[in-house]
Amino acid sequence: MLPMLPVLMQATKTARATMAEWFECYPPGYPWTVASDYCIGDVNKPNDVFSFVIIAPHDTADNICAYIAGAAPKDLKNTKNIPLGLVQYLTCEVPVTFSISFVLKRDEGLLRAHLDVENMLELVPIAIAYLEHRLEQYPAERTVEVHERTVKRLKAFGRELASKNLNAKLARQMHLAAAASATVFNNLNFARQPKVIRWISDRDALIARHDAVVYDLTYVYYMLQAQEYAMGELEAGRPVTTTLADLGFEIPEQTGKHLYDEIIRLPDYLAGTLADLNSETMAMSREKFDVVLNSVFINSKTNWVIQLLSGEGRITARSALLRGWN
């Protein structure tokens, strides 16, 4: 359905193997949490970034929030000094977190070149037809009411794609967010076989649009990507898990405090830092970004950067290992 889905799975192959080893102490069947934040469209930054932090079921959400609230009471934008406690949580030697961030240079217009409006419009009826098929083949997977609400959101998205007032940039970002999210969820699924994956996203325009239709896109991409990956593994003679984790989505309120502001602070620090990074010179505009880069990303096996590129008329992706001087 979306050409970048297998590309992203291939680019995260090593990260997936590392994640499976890192989290091997957690048996299958546990509920897991993924928190995400984005730094996109900032004309003062060289990169657009989608960051995801996978949080192991090592404690309750309330206790994790309480820890982060004490260790890092402010988000990256509003702090001058990087809190040690947050860095320690993201780099803990005990397996509690693992992050994957997707980075693309903002001025290259990669999505504009490879995901035009016609392509996005064509994807809407395909997604609806796929969900109709799922409802017919697996009626216990979702109720008719849930299905009808999903189709309503997708159709509304389709009408916007066909209108003259389309925000094409936002629509492309929604597709990339859905593809990146699906990739992270599938990596976690194949690494640890969780029972449920709860996605906690920051409040953002790409999340709010059309009553969070990006979650519907993510679900479709998650299922299709999983099927394609499984078929490839079986054809290669490798066993794959036969079950997929259920996805749960936290819908952030439009105003006021986000229920999980503290947890979202984890990907916030990652996305804000990578957005500021000059990949040619490794230079940062402010010292606090440099602290996160060197303390969290450099020579890290648990905080991965996936760079999206344009090559041979298509989107490509690769793991980018950030190394220090010594």
Image (cartoon, helix red, strand yellow):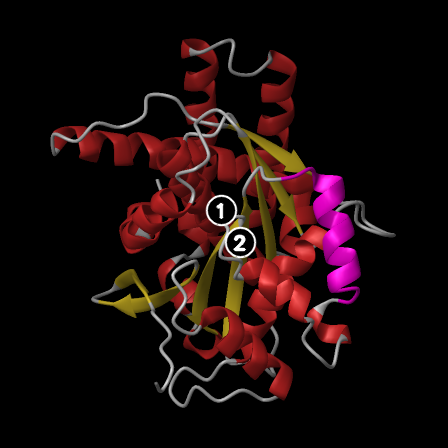
- Depth check, mark 2 against mark 1: the one in front is 2
Q: How packed is label 1: few (under 14 Cα within 10 Å), some, or many (20 or more)?
A: many
Q: Is residue 204 magenta?
A: no
Q: Which residue is mark 1?
A: 181
Amino acid on which disc 2 is placed = Phe
Question: Could you say which is closer to the camera, residue 194 or residue 309?
Answer: 194
Q: Quadrant of residue 262?
A: bottom right
Highlighted magenta segment, given as a residue range: 59-74
Q: How packed is label 2: few (under 14 Cα within 10 Å), some, or many (20 or more)?
A: many
Q: Is residue 88 above or below residue 78?
A: above
Q: Compute the Cα span from label 2 to label 1.
A: 8 Å
Q: Is residue 212 left or right of residue 137?
A: right
Q: Secondary structure at mark 2?
A: strand
Q: Which residue is mark 2?
A: 52
Quadrant in the picture for the N terminus? top left
Question: Could you say which is closer to the camera, residue 189 or residue 21?
Answer: 21
Residue 105 image offset from top left, x and y in percent = 44, 75
Q: Residue at x 12, y 30 (%)?
A: 237
Q: Is residue 274 visible?
A: no
Q: Residue at x 43, y 86 (%)?
A: 282
Q: What predominant SS class does the magenta segment belong to? A: helix
Question: Residues at badges 2 and 1 in contact (C-beta under 8 Å)?
Answer: yes
Amino acid on which disc 1 is placed = Ser
Q: Residue at x 74, y 81 (%)?
A: 80
Q: Is residue 264 above or below residue 56?
A: below
